[in-house]
Image: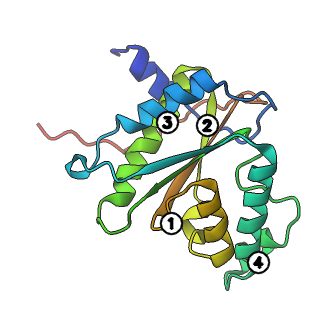
Amino acid sequence: MKTNAVLEAIKNRRSVRTYTEQQVSKEDLDAILEAATYAPNGMHLETWHFTAIQNKEKLTLLNEHIRGAFAKSDDKRLQERGNNVNYNCYYHAPTLIIVSNEPTQWWAGMDCAVALENIFLAAQSLGIGSCWINQLGTTCDDPEVRAYLTSLGVPEHHKVYGCAALGYANTPLKEKKLKEDTITVVG
């Protein structure tokens, strides 16, 4: 089967949920963030925003705010996470990139999704593990979470559509098993 560096990065990328404490370098983070800005986006409006956090205390406080929002939820599963002192939505990764956008355009979430994919592939190409983190998408409108996000630099009028946990894998990654019957080619 045909291959190249991009196809290999796509094939080898896995979600990482245990990280070492080694921080992603500024040079690598800058390259990953730049890759995000090259993603396709609706009408080339580039209304998205990327907020990178590498401060452990700020990440811990963000997780506490998310847990607080979960604890107030009507969903029993989210309440359990919110009341679990060991719950960490970003798996203790040393870097978290929050991807947000103006919710006024119907394609805002799709723009963020393709930017996140660029983040994941750029990270993979640099030997950095990653994982898509969704929790802020459901909690970003909670008043305490929103205030904290704004203090971190997330534009006040933005909705969070996803985050990327970044760091170096602490455990071996599983091999991908392809599901059958997921591709149809019509000639």
In the rendered image, which residue does mark 1 sit on? 156
Q: Earlier in the sequence, mark 1 or mark 4?
A: 4
Q: CA distance from mark 1 to mark 2?
A: 26 Å
User: Which circle, 1 or 4, is nearer the viewer?
Assistant: 1
Q: CA distance from mark 2 to mark 4?
A: 26 Å
Question: Which residue is depicted at the point 43% across and 37% down?
Answer: 36
In the rendered image, which residue does mark 4 sit on? 71
Mark 1 neighbour density, 10 Å: few (under 14) some (14–19) many (20 or more)? few
User: Where is residue 135 shown, x and y percent of the image?
Assistant: 62, 62
User: Which circle, 3 or 2, is nearer the viewer?
Assistant: 3
Mark 4 neighbour density, 10 Å: few (under 14) some (14–19) many (20 or more)? some
Q: Earlier in the sequence, mark 4 or mark 3?
A: 4
- Residue at the bottom extreme, as displayed: 74
In the rendered image, which residue does mark 3 sit on? 119
Name the foreground residue: 159 vs 87.
159
Q: What coloring was used for the rendering?
A: rainbow
Q: Is residue 47 above or below residue 179?
A: below
- Residue at the right extreme, as displayed: 85
Question: Which residue is depicted at the point 64% across and 60% down?
Answer: 151
Mark 2 neighbour density, 10 Å: few (under 14) some (14–19) many (20 or more)? many
Label placed on residue 183: none
Report the amino acid beneath label 1: Glu
User: Which circle, 1 or 2, is nearer the viewer?
Assistant: 1
Question: Which residue is depicted at the point 51% across and 35% down?
Answer: 120
Instruction: Identify the element where label 4 is drawn.
Output: helix
Which quadrant would residue 13 be assigned to in this image?
top right
In the rendered image, which residue does mark 2 sit on? 130
Instruction: Identify the element where label 3 is drawn.
Output: helix
Q: Is residue 33 above or below residue 71?
A: above
Q: Earlier in the sequence, mark 2 or mark 4?
A: 4
Q: Earlier in the sequence, mark 1 or mark 2?
A: 2
The reply to whether residue 86 is in sight is yes
